[in-house]
Amino acid sequence: MLTLDTSVADKIWENWLRMWNEDSDIAHDIISPAGYVLHLPDATATIDPSTISGPAEMSKWVAGFTGKFEGLRYTTDFGPFVDEDERRFAYRWIGTGRWTGATGWPHDIPGQEAIFVGVDIFQVDESLQITECWSQGAVTRTT
């Protein structure tokens, strides 16, 4: 069994950011094909999280979501917080980009800057692939 520590959490997180920022197909490298559960807050979810059960669905959702913005980039605000015994870790993130009018949200005014903040908490299996993610994010400011 592999061990989750801060350096391993950092590597998984770097790939998570690459999945969101560069190549959604990285989901196939970091999400467990044996089963994945995505938890999103009901009031602000852009999808029904029960439709995301593995790497293929995650890749498709990430590509679709990021495609609704111009230049959307996620960075690390702080973390990780690691629970080695439970194989869980968490990061706080910031996302910035420009609205394109594609989300249907009332504050989506094309060309204006959007800033998101959030926290992702991950559960990994014995092979250190992600089996669960609790994600909470919110738009904090538009310009």
Image: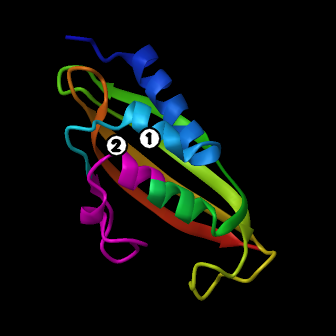
Classed neighbour count for the residue bearing mark 1: other residues with Cα under 10 Å, few (<14), some (14–19), many (≥20): many
Q: Residue at x 62, y 54 (%)?
A: 95
Residue toward you, 102 or 54: 54
Coordinates of residue 60 in the picture (x, y in percent): 46, 57
- Residue type (three-letter) at the residue carrying disc 1: Ala
SS category of the residue bearing label 1:
helix
Q: Residue at x 45, y 60 (%)?
A: 61
Coordinates of residue 111 in the picture (x, y in percent): 81, 75
Q: Nearer the viewer, mark 2 or mark 1?
A: 1
SS category of the residue bearing label 2:
strand
Q: Is residue 66 left or right of residue 59?
A: right
* Image label count: 2
Q: Residue at x 37, y 55 (%)?
A: 57
Label 2 to label 1: alpha-carbon separation: 16 Å
Residue 58 is inside the magenta segment: yes
Query: Which residue is tagged 1?
Result: 27
Q: Quadrant of the C terminus?
A: bottom right
Q: Residue at x 60, y 60 (%)?
A: 66
Report the disc number at residue 121.
2
- Residue type (three-letter) at the residue carrying disc 2: Ile
Coordinates of residue 75 in the picture (x, y in percent): 63, 42
Task: Point out the stretch of residues depicted in magenta.
Answer: 38-59
